[in-house]
Image (cartoon, rainbow, N blue to C red):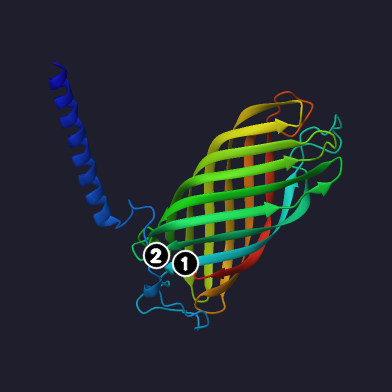
């Protein structure tokens, strides 16, 4: 009986593997290399001409084909970070989305293959806000996303869906005696939409995420919260050359719940908004 059971399970496993291979083969026909997350990037096939004149039109098309290969972006951030709901028992300086300004940096890099799939990595840091006893802290974020480029949409717009993992950390130092550290690990879904016309690229990005937040309250005690939120950006880029552009965008990160900021509360779970302007340069995207 045991021999028959082992043989049956062997047949089931083989059948499932065969079906999975067939599905992958069919999917690879439509999106080559989509099921191979670490596809080699053949740099020899990419004709990088950093200072070539920008492409402003293509025969028979309303828009210009997007770039492929390795890309890099740098942006300087000018953001506003919301205050906690209650600051040391003082409601007069807190409440809602009242916030304080701070600065930071953001770097995006990755690649898109000629088969229309690739990777996007993004990291950014805010050094503030630095309003003592009212709103003081810092923020860090790093994410890795698998991306795909879909066929061109109506009116020349392109869409690049993404799925990935993100780590965020917010350190609240408003209370000078108790250090609050939020460590968030989330899964996220998103998309990038853009259209290249003349020397301009109009673009937008959206992400939605959910996961777990581990909150550390100095020596008092730790706890965990579920965290949900999203990020939205809308901007434009002006192409100086074929592969170099200057761009500006409005970026908003919203954490709907799960942030620990009040060191006195035992299980604090607040929302937080980070919004503002970023400007910088882009290479080959």
Q: Give SS at disc 2.
A: loop
Pointers 1 and 2 in contact (C-beta within 8 Å)? yes
| Mark 2 neighbour class, 10 Å CA radius: few under 14, some 14 to 19, many 20 or more | some
Between 196 and 23, the one lying in front of the other is 23
Q: Give SS at disc 1.
A: strand
CA gap between label 1 and label 2 equals 8 Å
Q: Position of residue 204 (x, y in %)?
A: 53, 57
Task: Name the residue: 33% across, 62% down.
Answer: 115
Task: Name the residue: 62% across, 48% down.
Answer: 141
Horizontally, residue 14 falls left or right of residue 227, namely left
| Mark 1 neighbour class, 10 Å CA radius: few under 14, some 14 to 19, many 20 or more | many
Task: Name the residue: 69% across, 40% down.
Answer: 272
Q: Position of residue 59 (x, y in %)?
A: 36, 79
- Residue position marked by numbered label 2 in the rendering: 41
- Residue position marked by numbered label 1 in the rendering: 70
Q: Earlier in the sequence, mark 1 or mark 2?
A: 2
């Amino acid at each position: 009986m045991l021999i028959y059971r082992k043989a049956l399970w062997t047949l089931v496993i083989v059948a499932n593997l065969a079906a999975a291979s067939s599905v992958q083969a069919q999917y690879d026909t439509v999106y080559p290399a989509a099921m191979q997350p670490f596809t080699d990037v053949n740099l020899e096939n990419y004709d990088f001409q950093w200072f070539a004149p920008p492409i402003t039109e293509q025969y028979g098309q309303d828009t210009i084909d997007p770039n492929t290969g390795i890309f890099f972006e740098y942006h300087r951030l000018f953001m506003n970070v919301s205050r906690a709901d209650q600051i040391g028992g003082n409601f007069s300086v807190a409440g809602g989305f009242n916030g304080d300004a701070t600065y930071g940096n953001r770097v995006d890099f990755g690649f898109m293959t000629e088969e229309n799939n690739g990777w996007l990595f993004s990291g950014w840091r805010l050094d503030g806000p630095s309003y003592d006893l009212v709103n003081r802290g810092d923020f860090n974020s790093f994410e890795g996303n698998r991306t795909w480029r879909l066929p061109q949409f109506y009116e020349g717009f392109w869409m690049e869906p993404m799925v990935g993992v993100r780590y965020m950390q917010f350190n609240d130092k408003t209370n000078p005696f108790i250090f609050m550290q939020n460590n968030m690990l989330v899964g996220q879904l998103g998309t990038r939409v853009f259209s290249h016309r003349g020397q301009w690229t109009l673009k937008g990005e959206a992400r939605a995420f959910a996961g777990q937040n581990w909150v550390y309250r100095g020596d008092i005690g730790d706890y965990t919260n579920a965290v949900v939120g999203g990020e939205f950006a809308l901007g434009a880029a002006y192409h100086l050359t074929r592969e170099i552009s200057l761009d500006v965008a409005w970026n908003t990160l919203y954490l709907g719940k799960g942030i620990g900021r009040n060191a006195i509360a035992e299980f604090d779970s607040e929302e937080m908004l980070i919004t503002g302007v970023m400007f910088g340069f882009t290479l080959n995207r």
